[in-house]
Amino acid sequence: MSEGSSHSCWGGKDSDNESEFEESSSKDSRMEIIEGRGSMDHAIYKAAITGNLDVFVVALDDLEGSILDQISPQKNTILHIAASRGHDHLVKPILRRRQRLFKLKNSVGDLPIHLAASSRHQSTVQYLISEAKEKDVKDGLKAANQEGNTLLHLAFKNRHKEVAKLLFVKNKEASCCLNKEDKSPMYMVVEAGYLHLVTVMITYCYNTKMNNSGKMRQGKSIVHAATETRNKGDGNFIFKFK
């Protein structure tokens, strides 16, 4: 499947229980940083949380950049905080002045783009992906945190289907990467009940070298995930999956 044709393949209808999964996880799916500002400047920390660009201008005009280099107790940078809240109007000028913040990880190994992917902020993820490619820091798209979760893992874990579609198109090779629970994004998409996306991902893997490398058979079985999904309420899912 070529990337040029990827956009049109999302038209199929997913499992009937898809809305149930998304509704049940919507209450806690948005990742929020609540840790205290630590040594961060109070006004700048609050501006990053609330998205107040007027206050943030002070940091952006700081020629030495010391304010932009501050970190929280959990080693989140200003970019981590702004990205986790989906404040694109802050993320863009921060990156223009401090490109290296893209590659800085917090205390649990998350890059700013990991937090955006965990928090349903599709436009932020899209912008950070475009910046990664333009600045040739593509490793950020494949990086895993301390739990072994890639961006695609995090999107499925938090039931963000549209973000997951975007990330799959941009980094299809991550489909079979295993996290520390031995779960691949392929396993997690089955868990989520996104039948059409399951079909697209399996088709890709079978049509590439992944099929011959044995990667699809590593980690937890996707058939097991299909059975669990059926047991949670979609009696037809496993039959569709087969």
Image (spheres, rainbow, N blue to C red):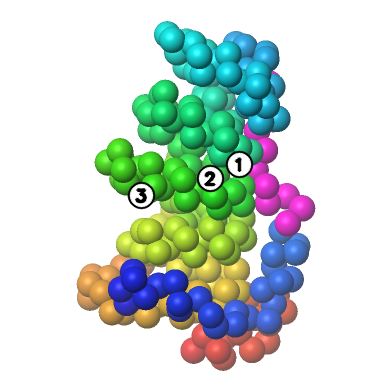
Amino acid type of the residue that numbered disc 3 sits on in the rendered structure: Lys
Residue occupying image coordinates x 46% and y 37%: 111
Amino acid type of the residue that numbered disc 1 sits on in the rendered structure: Gly
Q: Which residue is mark 3?
A: 142
Q: CA separation, marks 3 and 2?
A: 17 Å
Answer with the quarter of the image where residue 227 lies: bottom right
Confirm or deny contact between disc 2 and disc 1 (CB under 8 A): yes
Is residue 233 depicted above or below 73 in this figure?
below
Tell us which disc is closer to us: 1 or 3. 1
Amino acid type of the residue that numbered disc 2 sits on in the rendered structure: Thr
Regarding mark 3 in the picture, which secondary structure is present there? helix
Residue occupying image coordinates x 38% and y 29%: 99
- Residue 124 image label: 2
- Front residue of 112/185: it is 112
For mark 2, does the 10 Å Cα neighbourhood hold few (<14), some (14 to 19), or many (20 or more) residues?
many
Q: Is residue 230 left or right of residue 27?
A: left
Regarding mark 1 in the picture, which secondary structure is present there? loop
Is residue 171 shown to the viewer in this render?
yes
Q: Which residues are magenta?
A: 26-38
Any magenta on residue 132? no
Answer with the quarter of the image where residue 12 lies: bottom right
Q: Earlier in the sequence, mark 3 or mark 2?
A: 2
Q: Earlier in the sequence, mark 1 or mark 3?
A: 1
Q: Which residue is mark 1?
A: 86
